[in-house]
Structure formats: C-alpha cells, structure tokens
Amino acid sequence: MIELIVPQWIAPVEPDATVLEEHAIAIDDGRIVDLGPAAAVRARHPQARPTELPGHLLIPGLVNLHGHAAMALMRGMADDLPLERWLRERIWPLEARLMGPDLVFDGTVLACAEMVTGGITCFNDMYFFPEETARAAQALGMRASLGIIVIDFASAYGSGPDDYLAKGLALRDAMRDEPLISFCLAPHAPYSVGSDALSKVARLSAELSMPVHTHLQETAAEVDDCLRLFGKRPLARLAELGLLGPELIAAHSVHVDEQDLQLMARHGVSVAHCPHSNLKLASGIAPTARMRALGINVGIGTDGAASNNRLDLIGEARTASLLAKGASGDATAWSAHETLRAMTIAGASALGLADRIGSITIGKRADLVAIDLGAQELIPVHDPVSHFVYACGREHVAEVWIDGRHVVRKRQLLEAGALRTAAEVVARTGLWQNRLGKIVPGD
Amino acid sequence: MIELIVPQWIAPVEPDATVLEEHAIAIDDGRIVDLGPAAAVRARHPQARPTELPGHLLIPGLVNLHGHAAMALMRGMADDLPLERWLRERIWPLEARLMGPDLVFDGTVLACAEMVTGGITCFNDMYFFPEETARAAQALGMRASLGIIVIDFASAYGSGPDDYLAKGLALRDAMRDEPLISFCLAPHAPYSVGSDALSKVARLSAELSMPVHTHLQETAAEVDDCLRLFGKRPLARLAELGLLGPELIAAHSVHVDEQDLQLMARHGVSVAHCPHSNLKLASGIAPTARMRALGINVGIGTDGAASNNRLDLIGEARTASLLAKGASGDATAWSAHETLRAMTIAGASALGLADRIGSITIGKRADLVAIDLGAQELIPVHDPVSHFVYACGREHVAEVWIDGRHVVRKRQLLEAGALRTAAEVVARTGLWQNRLGKIVPGD
C-alpha cells in the first residue's frame, strides 16, 4: 500500500537550502518513491492513503552521531565534575558493579523512547553488550549503528581487545540481514586502546569497509598525555596507525589546533560534535565554524545521558549553531540550513549510510520527521527552517517514520510492541534506581 | 478557600540547595501560608482542597530578567546577523514601519502564552507602548516589570527622552494599585541615550526607588565606541552619571573586564545574562563563572524572540550553566542549585521583588511551577534538581500558579479569559505575517 505524506513544507536537505511548499511524497515498501507538487503526487497515486499535515514541516530523520544509549539509567548521577573525575570516580565504578545485558537493554530502551519521540531515527552507539543495544533498537523500531567496542580493560562483556573484537564481529555476522542495523569499529579512545589493537582496527576497517568510531582529543589533558607518552598528538598517532580517512568518526574533537584541522580535512575525517557534553564536563568548545570553513563533515551527537543529560538532538544542534556563531564571532556561521544538514546528511555520510538516509530523496529509505509549526509559540512562520533550528524544541516533533514505518503519531509511540517494551522497562526503573543509588557516590 | 499543593519534591530555593520530599504548602488569598511535612500540613488545613502531584517537583515561578516580549511577532525575521546589522538593517526599519499599540499587544500576548506555559511567572520587559505590554500580561495573568523606556530617537510611541519619561511615569501612576505590575526605568543603552537623559534617570531612580534596566556592554564595538567618544568604558560612564548601584540591572554584560567586574561587585549591580541571544548575534560569552565568584547577582533573560528565538527560560538557564562550565574550564561552576537560584531569586532580587517572590517561603506570594519528573525520558530520578536543570525542558512544565491563581493546568492555559485573548491573537497572526513579510529584507 502506497502512503502519501502531505505536509505544508518539506526541507529535503538535498538539494541544499531548499524549502518546498505544498509538495508531497509517496512511500512504498519503506522507500520514497515520489516527490513533487502535492496535486501532482496525489494524481499519480490515486489509491494511496494520504497523511495530511497542514502547518507541519517535513524533514529527514535526525541522526545522533555519538552516544552511549544505555547510560540513560545513570542520568543525573555524576554532575558538576570534569571528564577525568566523572569517568574514574563515578562512571567506571558504577559500570564495574552493574554492567550486564539487563542494564544495557533497559537503559537503551529508555534512551530509544526518548530519542525517537524527539525525532532521532538513527543513532550511532558505543557501549558494552551491543547485542542488547540492537535488541532495544529493534523493539523501538529504530535504525542503529552499533559500535564494536575495543578497550584495553576487561569488563563483564569481554576480557580485552581481541575478545571484544571477536564478539563484535560475530554479532555483525549474525545480524547481517537486519535492515536497520549497521556496525562501526569502536575503539574507545586513543588513551584507552593500545597501538596493536588500533592497528588491528585499521586493518579490519579496510578489509570490511567499516567506519571507525572513537573519542578523540576531547580534553586538553588527553592531548598533553599523548604528547608525553608518544611524542605526538592523538590525531598524528592515529595517522601513523593508518586510521585517518573518510571512515573515521572523531567524537568531540574539542582540542584540535589548525594542524589537526588541516589533517582532518585532508583525510576526509568526520567529526561528531557534542557541545552539551563538552560544556558540561568543562572540556571546552570545539572550533566548529573553522571545521566547516575547511569543509570537514560535522555531525551532531548527544553523547550519553550521564554527561549531557538530555538525548535531544534538536536542542543539541541549536546549541551547536549558536555556539559556532558566539565562539567564532561570526554570526553567519552555521546558518539554519547548514545546521539542519549537520543533524541529517552529515551524520548519514559519516556512517556510510548517505545512499539510504539523510535526505528526502526519491530512492532513499523513508526516515522522516514532521515538526508541528502551528504551535502558539511558533506563529507566525516567516521561515520554517529558521523556526525548526532556532525556535523549535523536541516538543514540536509530531510524527516520525523509520524505514517507512510510522513509529510516532501525535508525539506518542505508535506501535504496540514498542509501547509494551517501553512500559515493561519503565516498570523496572525503580529497581535500577535502588541498585544504582546504593553505589554512588565514590563507593 | 485554602488550597494545598502536595508534590513529591519541593525545591524552595531559600534555604539554598534544599530539597524537601513529601512536603506540602498551603495557599490562602494568593499567599503561601504554610509549608511542612505533607501529613502535618494536611492535618492543619482539613478543609483545604489539595492538588496532588506525585512525581512532580515544585519550584518558585521563573523570572525572565530581560526581554522585549512584543518582538515575538518578528521571530525568525533576522537570523544569522551580528547585533549592529540586526538592529540597523532589520529590527529598527521594521519597527519604524509597524510600531503601534496593536503590534505591542498582539506580540506580547503571544510571548506571554509561550512564557507562562514554559514556567515563567514574571518577566522584565523593555519596549514601546508599555501600557499594551501591561494589558497583555494582565490578560494572561502574569506578573510583569515594565520598562519606562528612554531612547534618543523618536518613535510612534514618543518624541524623545522627556516624552518617554513623562508617558512612562504617568502609566506608573495610573497602575500603582495593580498588584502584578511593577516598573523599571529603562534607558535603552548608553550608546542610544545621552548623558542628560541618563542623569535624569539616575535622579528619578533615587527619588522613586525604582530599578534601572539597561543594555550594557553587549558587544566589543559598544565598548570601543564609548572609549572613543567619552574616553571611558560604558560602566565607568554610568558610574560617573550616578547609575551604579543595587538598583541597576545590566542586561548582557558580555564584554566586561576584571575592572568592570570589580566595579559591578562593589556597587551591587545585577546582571541579566542572555546567553542564547549573545551567542546568536555573535556578541560573545559573558564571564558568568567569574561574576558568581565575585558575588555578583546574575539572573537569566531570554531577550526578545527576534534574537533568541525562543522564550524558554529553562533552556536558557541550562545553556547558562553549561556555558559557565565550558567557558571557564571549571565543571563545578553554576551547579544545578545555583542555576535554579539564577532563574528565580536572583531575578526577583534584581527587580526589588525578593520580599514577594523568588522562593517558596511562608509569607511570599504564591508564584509556583510544578515540573513533571515522571516522564519516560526523566526516570529514574536520582536528584530532582539536577533533572530539572540538566535534563528537563519547558515540555515538562505541568502546572503554574501566579499570585495564587492556577493559570496553567496539564500544560494548557486554564483561565477562560486568557484562552480567549490568546485565541483572538492567534487568529490575527496571519495578518501580521503579511504586514511584516512585505517589509523584510532591507526594504
């Protein structure tokens, strides 16, 4: 059955900086099969069932390019701390005590419910037990890019780099026919993964054509430590290990100097910019106006809820745009349309998924979000994309489709299975609160 | 009739950093008359009607310390421009063509509907035709501090400083018995008001015990121009004119050096910090961690919707907290409790209203907001104030009381008069869109 969506405006992202008024799209079997003036699309598909959305702006589904979804259970447990203490005094001790498939599944279900009702249709994750992340994403109907985590220390999930890689690659094989699931190699960070394991990741990435997702140059201390231990900056070390290229997604990239930026631009590295987390942990402000001026592909990530504390890509991108202007002194940096690209096609490109998602284009999968611009606090609408980026919040996300399935209707999860899973997890959060609450602080 | 409010948590703000669980308050004739453990309060007021709010956090009403509410009609008409061009090329030409009581009333009604449903119970405004601002605030049941604007150029509202002062003071006299309305003297900025008029404002402020609300050191250019014209920085010039003191509310204060900050601290000047507007116009980042370290009273303002573009004090304060940490490199700056103070008691103090509002204290007026922390994206709740500041959005504002009147219930305007006025204005926004749209850009 062909479905039509007839919003007031469409911002297709490709071509760039375009707003179509009184246009419609047609979806068949999860794919966008038509796009044109509403009357013509209706005429070409007379049997189709239309979803009429007056006052709504239709945009591509949002791509959350960096996060740790399961940490939703730890939201608000580690505030007002810098990254190093946040990790060593709070997060790692909590994880050491409670890490397991149940924590990852339940935390990720909560995160997915928050993300999808906020317009995020695809998320790029890095955490232990990625099979549970996958199970949670599937239960909520979301597209997910799972990290094959690599880290030098043991956890409940694995004993070390070789074990993590073996488990992750086996999962990837097992899930190769899942249409909404893809994988990245995910070495945690240059400071937590040794050179042998990083070289192995580089070889696997080349052999298997997989993106590599890592934390990079998030703090000044990380850069200083690397200089002391290796005589070079983390990016230069990754370059030497064969890891710089268009497959690399460098999360954070706060402390990057002009030489780093030139290196990233030359190699086509993508950045996952996480402004709220960087500010909250006092890591600093990434030079994103300069990144875009050099043509670096910059997507947006929420990071995990323990350091953000909100998995809201719309709010995150608004801050990204405002911060790019305020920190660079250039009010034209990160315009509304450029910010919309960062939330959609930039993330899709970084994940190697730009042929399938990231824009409203005939032939791509139907990952779509309808924003209600008819709300009292948004009228009059002089420019729908300005309103979306600068004035809307996730509270204006009305409808969401993923791979053609209508998963959010009138701000609520729509599918019975998703609702049931979310309700089951909500019922268990009291138990998690007790288990987590007994450990913190500094136990 | 006494009303009880029985939330799960209360953050009274005074005493500082306190969270009360299973407590309740009683309201009588608009005033908070009791606060204590829920069972005891219920027992003391057996006839009272209780509002039960399990899963909710009760906080004082939020104070928006700087804005231009009427500009809600111009939201999204002047993006991606620095302040100087934003004013001269867009805002002032628009205002010159369309300024009038109808624009101010309709714009302010839209702004009030947005603000009050987002938990703002009191706003400090600066604009032309303040009698219309007052009328709109009263229609929506809001507390308002109106600026007696002073600016060197003529407008549809007045011919110059003396005329503006005369009209504003007459309005103040006429409204002296309105319990929710108060006034500030509001010289627009040192660069747009001459020294004679500023001196007159200083005299009036002393004679009438009125706060003075002005834009101050918002951009580097403003400071440079003042140095060139007057041989001193704007703050030093205001000091010379007798305007520095606890009655001064300095909006923005982005470009303040250590000497400026010492001067502000010594004189007890308050700052209205507007981070989104400062970032969006590329004005810069105010040194708010340093301000607080010096004991300067810092409240939060949204500024107008033409430069923000969102009248959301919760989002604004979250950015204020994150930016204070990220820009200072100190993750402990602007903790959750300190940020809650900035949104409430700091604004009330700056406006001279701390004896009436700004905290949940027996004897104060009942300006209250209940935040729904039971939402799926907020559980588990390890710390309700952390969740409010770092994870909530205005979408979690459930109930609002102003001066004891229940004005927002389950996220919707409650009173028939407010709903009718809002609906009438909404019906006229199409006309405003046409009128405004014909003028921009650069006509």
Image (spheres, coloured by chain):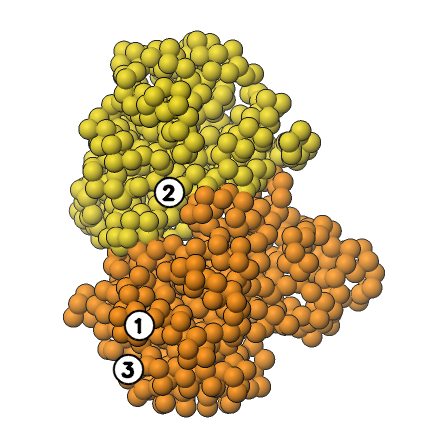
Chain colours: A yellow, B orange
Q: Secondary structure at mark 3?
A: loop
Number of numbered tags placed on the structure image: 3
Residue identifier under label 2:
A285
Q: Are marks 2 and 1 in contact (CB under 8 Å)?
A: no
Q: Which residue is mark 3?
A: B153
Is residue A11 rendered to the left or right of residue A402? Answer: left
Point 53% across, 51% down: residue: B334
Mark 3 → mark 1, Cα distance in angstroms: 24 Å
Q: Position of residue B207 (x, y in %)?
A: 52, 87
Q: Kindly identify the amino acid type of the residue bearing the numbered disc 2.
A: Ile
Mark 2 vs mark 3: tell me if same chain.
no
What chain letter is assigned to the residue under label 2? Answer: A
Q: Nearer the viewer, residue B37 or A417?
A: B37
- Give the camera-side residue of A425 and A244: A244
Q: Which residue does the image show at 45% across and 82% down from the upper left?
A: B202
- Which residue is labeled 1 in the image? B231
Q: Which of pointers 3 and 1 lies earlier in the amino acid sequence? A: 3
Tell me if A89 is positioned left or right of A273 in this view: right
